[in-house]
Image (cartoon, grey):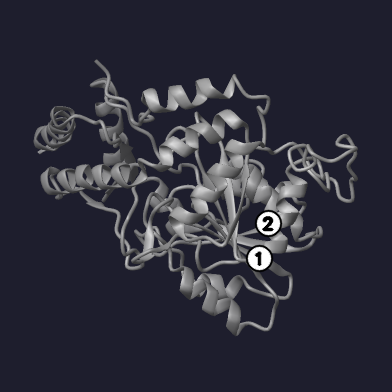
């Protein structure tokens, strides 16, 4: 039997909450969405938030509020998921890629400083797999420049991760966006996202843009005499969260602490028992409490990564690589020069199964398959 890379943790509570939706008249952007937004704010100490259909749509909407022009630049890591790059391209801005530190998931601050100029309008910082980047450091760099730069965080991978006790991911920037996809810390039935910010007006703008640009949503005008009437002042899109997604999210939010604890426990077991002669593990100097979604192995040689990936697949162990290729190697971004450290890292990493219900017997099986391969190769 195959051991999957990831598995959404869903039970009867989600099923029952979704079933109730069909007895209500609201199926999109209604009372459950409001309840989920309020619960999310309260759980993670955010000031304002707006639910969206996905993390990608959230990134696009935040950038859209900034009215970026053709020659405006957005700095982001080349070691990244495609969504971040597409969000920049869809807002007609120019992506400027920065490198990682050698054999590290942390961005290179010296490279960041070199890339900042008068055209820089946004720094988009992507956190990776439950560990946090140096958000305070990025904020301080922005403060020291003479340029007005918006600080946006892609927190798709770090829901519930803490910089300090009860200081959660996304707390140090102008805005941050989270994902509720099927492999993330919690899921809203497969998709969904959240934008958080200390800026009330920005969140208000997001709520307008996510609903075609309507100055009032259908839910907010339901009790008005002319409840069909609205006005469009800016062009938006349909990036609203459904009531079913929100009902899912409300139940998942109650389990997030347990999910986080169990994943960290499995991670510790992997680290303790895997043969470390040919590999090392992800770490961070900026994370008080991690919130993993995958388990990352970083091999000393790319050839070993490829051989192990093939070996695990043959033994029906789910694997993936987050991310290879790096953004600069995709045809829509392709450049002659590329970020070398990011490229090297992408060729050495491998994700193996990690989810709360992963059995200890399956964990042991995965470890034995990896360790036995190293013994054979000797």
Residue 274, quarter of picture: top left
Q: Nearer the viewer, residue 375 or 316?
A: 316
Q: Is residue 90 above or below residue 41?
A: above
Q: Is residue 9 positioned above or below 337 on the image?
A: above
Element type where label 1 sits in the image: loop
Query: Which of the 4 image quadrants contains residue 28?
Result: top right
Viewer can see residue 333? no
Q: In screen coordinates, is 253 left or right of 371?
A: right
The span from disc 1 to disc 2 (Cα, nearest Å) is: 7 Å
**Label pair 1/2, CB-CB below 8 angstroms:** yes
Residue at screen point 59% across, 84% down: 144
**For the point 72% across and 56% down, which residue is it?**
204
- 320, 166: nearer the viewer: 166
Q: In the rendering, at what x and y percent does residue 12 appear?
A: 37, 23
Whole-percent x, y for residue 200 in the image:
68, 63
According to the picture, the residue beneath numbered tag 2 turns out to be: 203
Specify the quadrant that holds the C terminus. top left
Residues packed near mark 1 inside 10 Å, few (<14), some (14 to 19) or many (20 plus): few
Residue where numbered disc 1 is placed:
199
Q: x, y (%) of residue 336?
A: 61, 53
Q: Say whether residue 356 is visible.
A: yes
Determine the residue positioned at 79% across, 62% down.
71
Judge by depth and name the residue closer to the eye, 121 or 339.
121
Q: Is residue 147 left or right of residue 192?
A: right
């Amino acid at each position: 039997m195959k051991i999957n890379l990831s598995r959404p943790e869903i039970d009867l509570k989600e099923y029952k909450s979704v079933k109730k939706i069909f007895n209500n008249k609201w199926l999109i952007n209604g009372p459950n969405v409001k309840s989920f937004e309020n619960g999310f704010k309260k759980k993670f100490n955010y000031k304002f938030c707006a639910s969206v259909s996905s993390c990608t749509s959230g990134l696009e909407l935040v950038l859209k509020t900034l009215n970026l022009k053709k020659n405006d630049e957005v700095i982001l890591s080349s070691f990244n998921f495609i969504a971040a790059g597409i969000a920049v391209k869809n807002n007609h801005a120019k992506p400027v890629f920065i490198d990682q530190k050698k054999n590290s998931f942390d961005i290179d601050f010296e490279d960041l400083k070199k890339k900042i100029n008068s055209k820089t309008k946004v720094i988009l910082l992507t956190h990776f797999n439950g560990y946090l980047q140096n958000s305070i450091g990025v904020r301080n760099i922005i403060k020291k420049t003479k340029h007005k730069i918006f600080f946006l965080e892609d927190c798709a991978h770090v829901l519930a991760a803490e910089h300090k006790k009860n200081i959660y991911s996304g707390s140090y920037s102008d805005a941050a966006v989270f994902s509720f996809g099927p492999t993330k810390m919690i899921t809203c039935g497969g998709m969904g996202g959240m934008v958080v910010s200390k800026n009330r007006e920005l969140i208000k703008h997001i709520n307008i843009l996510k609903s075609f640009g309507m100055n009032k949503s259908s839910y907010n005008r339901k009790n008005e005499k002319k409840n069909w009437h609205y006005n469009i002042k800016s062009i938006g899109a349909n990036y609203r969260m459904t009531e079913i997604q929100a009902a899912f999210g409300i139940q998942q939010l109650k389990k997030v602490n347990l999910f986080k604890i169990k994943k960290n426990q499995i991670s510790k077991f992997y680290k303790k028992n895997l043969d470390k002669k040919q590999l090392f593990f992800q770490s961070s100097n900026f994370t008080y409490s991690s919130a993993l979604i995958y388990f990352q192995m970083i091999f000393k040689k790319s050839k070993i990564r490829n051989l192990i990936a093939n070996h695990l697949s043959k033994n029906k162990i789910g694997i993936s690589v987050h991310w290879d290729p790096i953004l600069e190697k995709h045809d829509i971004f392709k450049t002659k020069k590329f970020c070398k450290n990011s490229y090297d890292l992408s060729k050495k990493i491998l994700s193996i199964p990690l989810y709360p219900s992963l059995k200890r017997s399956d964990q042991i099986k995965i470890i034995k398959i990896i360790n036995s391969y190293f013994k054979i190769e000797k």
